[in-house]
Amino acid sequence: MTHLQRRSFLGRTLTFLSGAWMTGAGTQSVQAQTASPTARLKALGITLPAPPAAIGIYVPAVRVGSLLFVSGHGPANLPDGTRPLGKVGRELTLEQGKDSARRVGLNVLTSVQTTMGSLDRVVRVVKVLGMVNVAPDFTEMPQVINGFSELMVEVFGKERGTGARSAVGMASLPQNIPVEVEAVFEVRD
């Protein structure tokens, strides 16, 4: 980069930053980034569902040191009270699968909040394993699990809400649910 290019870049950067400062745009993005997960949920108009009932012999989450291991969860009920069911790519579309993954996220957040007392004690999402009940020729599992991941980013912010992730297709899932997700969170006292 030449001296003239550096000056031009610096000038454009300072102009942008001063404009953002004068309009408050920079402040809003900083406020959005630093809002607590509880405040973000409220701002998004999200009410978490009641804790899901276990369908086996396990607990929803176990804390070991600074890590919270969350058991596999299925989706929260639809607004009409029914539970999403079926294979993505056969009974359900990609978009319905993605919505189901988001609904799984709501159940996971409920279990984290119930276990930790507050979502504000989450430091970050560490690892997500997303399992999608798929038709044999369906290959877009990562796009389905984006429904879960996008919710985590909305609640915890991009840096804290994005973790390592796997998205895999399954021949079946318990009770014919379309999506199951298990996750690991870093937490603090």
Image (cartoon, rainbow, N blue to C red):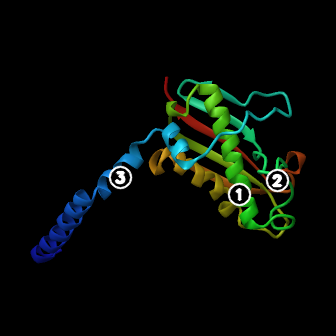
Q: Earlier in the sequence, mark 3 or mark 1?
A: 3
Whether residue 87 appears in this view of the structure is yes
Give the label, 2 or 3, closer to the camera: 3
To which residue does mark 2 refer?
Answer: 84
Secondary structure, mark 3, is helix
Question: Is disc 2 surrounded by few (<14), some (14 to 19) or many (20+) residues within 10 Å?
Answer: many
Indicate the position of residue 143 as horizontal and vertical percent values: 66, 63
Q: Is residue 169 left or right of residue 188?
A: right
Q: Is residue 38 above or below residue 88?
A: above
Whether residue 163 appears in this view of the structure is no
Q: Earlier in the sequence, mark 2 or mark 3?
A: 3
Q: Residue at x 87, y 45 (%)?
A: 174
Give the label, 3 or 1, closer to the camera: 3
- View extreme (right): residue: 175
Q: Residue at x 67, y 56 (%)?
A: 145
Secondary structure, mark 2, is loop
Q: Between marks 2 and 1, how big is the CA–CA gap?
A: 9 Å
Q: Nearer the viewer, residue 117 or 127?
A: 117
Q: Is residue 90 above or below residue 39?
A: below
Q: Earlier in the sequence, mark 2 or mark 1?
A: 2
Q: Between marks 2 and 3, how big is the CA–CA gap?
A: 36 Å
Numbered circle sitting on residue 99: 1
Numbered circle sitting on residue 28: 3
The amino acid type found where label 1 is placed reads Asp
| Quadrant (top left/top right/bottom left/bottom right) for the N terminus | bottom left
The amino acid type found where label 2 is placed reads Pro
The amino acid type found where label 3 is placed reads Gln
Q: Is residue 67 left or right of residue 49?
A: left
